[in-house]
Amino acid sequence: MNLIEIRMSQKVLKIIMLCIASVFLISTQANASVNYAQRADVKQFIDEMVNQHGFDRAYLEKKFSSAKRLDNVLESIAKPAEKELTWKQYRPIFVTSKRSNKGKVFIGQYREILDRAEKEFGVPAEIIAAIIGVESYYGKHTGKYTVFDSLTTLGFDYPKRGKFFKSELKQFLLLSKEEHIDVDEMTGSYAGAMGMPQFISSSYRRYAVDFDGDGKRDLWNSIPDVIGSVANYFSEHGWQKGGSVAYPVVVKNASIVRKENTLKPYASVDQFKQQGVSLKNISEQKLDGKQQATLLKLEGDKGDEYWLGLKNFYVITRYNHSDLYAMAVFQLSEKLKN
Ligand SMILES: [Ca+2]
């Protein structure tokens, strides 16, 4: 959601894979000479947390004096924007038989909880499972960075997005306090996405739910909490119960296709039909023509593909603002149905 920060350029992907491969070797490439607690900007931040949020000054000073600046986090985030992956490059990473087989096992194992989440939030089991499958390979890869160190590094040593990461750091400390979790135990991606669903701190505080009833919201260890939280996130972002996500279409006149894909639906299905867009699958012709959609063009392995993305497609992009991400989640979820 990143939100969750999946910047899927080829180079970044390689780095991610390298990180996974050698995570025990490089998880704390730290610059030991930095003492954050002595810096004026950090002192100001501590003042705010003490005065506005009731934190103990001595506790925060101690934490910040031992916070590590993670140089590899700065390197990862500062990579120049590179060519985005195309759909034909992106799809084989996430929409694989291996990932769908593992997803079916996951669904079988947690059927009861997924059904309960579906009933309560209206989000299908396959969509919830696909999100967890894409984000962390069903909970296997949740990130090895100490999020306190990552967010301190990014908040105070990455001016370009310092405001955002300082805000996330604040949310993170509040989360730690509310959930009674030691900041040093909270691990995640280099950009601070945590647990099996990779929630950033603000999303964790706002959307995570205690779905196993133990009084805690634990997205690292409780699968029920993870399932309920993903479902709640979708529900809160307007998931339409029983609604479709996307349909493959044929486009008669390519000039109506926008140069860049628009994530948000911007015209009705009927309007697209009037412009020569037709559904590929006849049995789906019953699609409500009044609902809003976006027309997407993706570079597939057999040439350009066209899709109508509906409201639920847009909702998936609220988890990660990427058309490729949403399409991968949708197609993986479809594979999980069979
Ligand atoms: Ca719980």
Image (cartoon, rainbow, N blue to C red):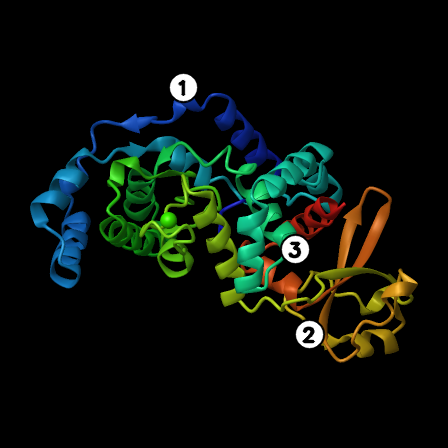
Residue 10 in the image: state x and y as whole percent: 62, 36
Residue at left offset 42%, top offset 59%: 207
In 3D space, how far apart are the residues under numbered discs 2 and 3 (Cα atoms)?
Answer: 15 Å
Q: Residues within 10 Å of mark 2 (few under 14, many from 20)?
A: few
Q: What SS does tag 1 mark?
A: helix
Q: Which residue was labeled with disc 2?
A: 266
**Relative to residue 18, is residue 269 drawn left or right?**
right
Residue 291 vs 301, above or below: the answer is: below
Residue 91 in the image: state x and y as whole percent: 71, 42
Residue 138 in the image: state x and y as whole percent: 55, 38
**Relative to residue 261, is residue 212 drawn left or right?**
left
Residue 2 vs 9, above or below: the answer is: below
Residue at left offset 28%, top offset 46%: 156
Q: Which residue was labeled with disc 3?
A: 323
Give the residue type at disc 2: Tyr
In 3D space, how far apart are the residues under numbered discs 1 and 3 (Cα atoms)?
Answer: 34 Å
Q: Quadrant of residue 206?
A: bottom left
**Relative to residue 217, is residue 277 drawn left or right?**
right
Name the one closer to the observer, 45 or 292: 292
Give the residue type at disc 3: Asp
- Please say whether residue 1 is visible from this viewpoint: no
Q: How crowded is mark 1: few (under 14 residues within 10 Å), some or many (20 or more)?
A: few
Give the residue type at disc 1: Leu
In 3D space, how far apart are the residues under numbered discs 1 and 2 (Cα atoms)?
Answer: 47 Å
Residue at left offset 46%, top offset 54%: 229
Name the one closer to the observer, 156 or 60: 60
Q: Which residue was labeled with disc 1?
A: 25
Name the one closer to the observer, 332 or 273: 332
Report if the beta carbon of the residue with label 2 is closer than 8 angstroms to ligand 1. no
- Please say whether residue 47 is visible from this viewpoint: yes
